[in-house]
Image (cartoon, helix red, strand yellow):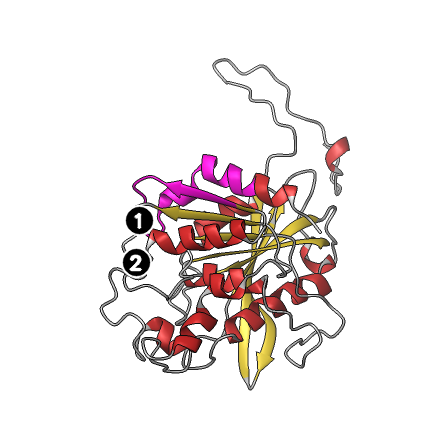
Amino acid sequence: MELKAWEYDEFPAFDEEVEGATWLDTTGNEMGVTYVPNVEYECVGGVSRVLQILIPNSRNAKAPRPGRPATRSYPCVVYVQGSAWMTQHVYANLPCIARLAAHGFVVAIVQYRESGIGVFPDPVRDARNAVRFMRVHAEAYAVDPTRVAVMGDSSGGHTACYVGILRDDDTPHNLFPGVSGDVSCIVNYYGSTDFTFEDANPSTLNHNAPDSPEGMIMGGVDLNRDRTAREQLTVACNIDADTDYPPILIMHGTKDRTVNTRCSVNLYHRLRETGHESYLYLLNGADHGGPEFWTPEVLGIVAGFIRRHWQ
């Protein structure tokens, strides 16, 4: 065989008969995922925040790298990791989130300013800046900037929901002037979205107290005493018929011991009564997260929903 840099199409395939071997056909469209770690997307007040970026790739559509642009672009999902608004373990769920990327989405996992560094709505502002960053750097990460969605779980689901409410494009919080932070749709996995009823967080004894996760992200506020702050943090209280809100898919387990399933039910009812497109899936027996939310069936529903809703 000639020694040279062979192009794929001209390289001769092995075709000898091998007794006992099984031959499997491939198409070149089988999907893998390339991981790009710790990409800084903002630095606010000396605090650097980064993204974990997952890029689909295949033999026929390779992921970009220095000196080699991507051969195609993909829709983008900006993913907000749950953490009770505390320090996010952004690497912990990478294997499961990579399954979503393998459906043909660039996924950017957001590290946002946690309680102690930021207060609400800082996580939402960070997520919207992550959306803008992916649009600005679309070519580098194989993104179609016209097709961006947001997704999150638990406290990250709360943040994802507020990405559809907060309109900060024309404020100093927009680190990419002229670039939109809006998204085409939202996926909310068991979001902690409602703080207006007593057992919203069944396993949290200090629910709504100043040292609770929700109290801390509000800056140490006692939400039991401060109704205005409680409603400010509750998603349903900030949506009415005039709210320009993108379509949303909500998924919640029926035995969630951390965030009451009724949080998602209440939000779903509010969205429907105000005329907003929304879908609720209740996973029988599922707790707060877990493998049930990453099955081929569930991810097929999520991927189908996202593909139907592009700006």
Q: Position of residue 301 (x, y in %)?
A: 52, 38
**Residue at position x 75%, y 41% from top?**
4
**Residue at position x 74%, y 46% from top?**
71
Residue 223, above or below 241: below
Front one among 76 and 213:
213
Residue 30, above or below 20: below
Q: Which residues are magenta?
A: 279-303
Image quarter hosting the N terminus: top right
Q: Residues within 10 Å of mark 1 (few under 14, many from 20)?
A: many
Rendered image: mark on residue 287: 1
Rendered image: mark on residue 160: none
Badge 2 is on which residue? 258
- Asked which quadrant contains residue 204, the reply is bottom left
Residue reaching furthest to the left = 205
- Is residue 273 found left or right of 202 in the rendered image? right
Residue 144 drawn in magenta: no
**Residue at position x 64%, y 59% from top?**
244
Q: Position of residue 78 (x, y in %)?
A: 57, 58
Q: Is residue 269 visible?
A: yes
Q: Position of residue 101 (x, y in %)?
A: 56, 47
Residue 288 drawn in magenta: yes
Residue reaching furthest to the bottom = 45
Under circle 2, the secondary element is: loop
- Asked which quadrant contains residue 145, the reply is bottom right
Real-space CA distance between mark 2 and mark 1, rounded to the nearest whole angstrom = 8 Å
Under circle 1, the secondary element is: loop
Asked if the residues shown at circle 2 and circle 1 are in contact, with their CB atoms under 8 angstroms apart, the answer is yes
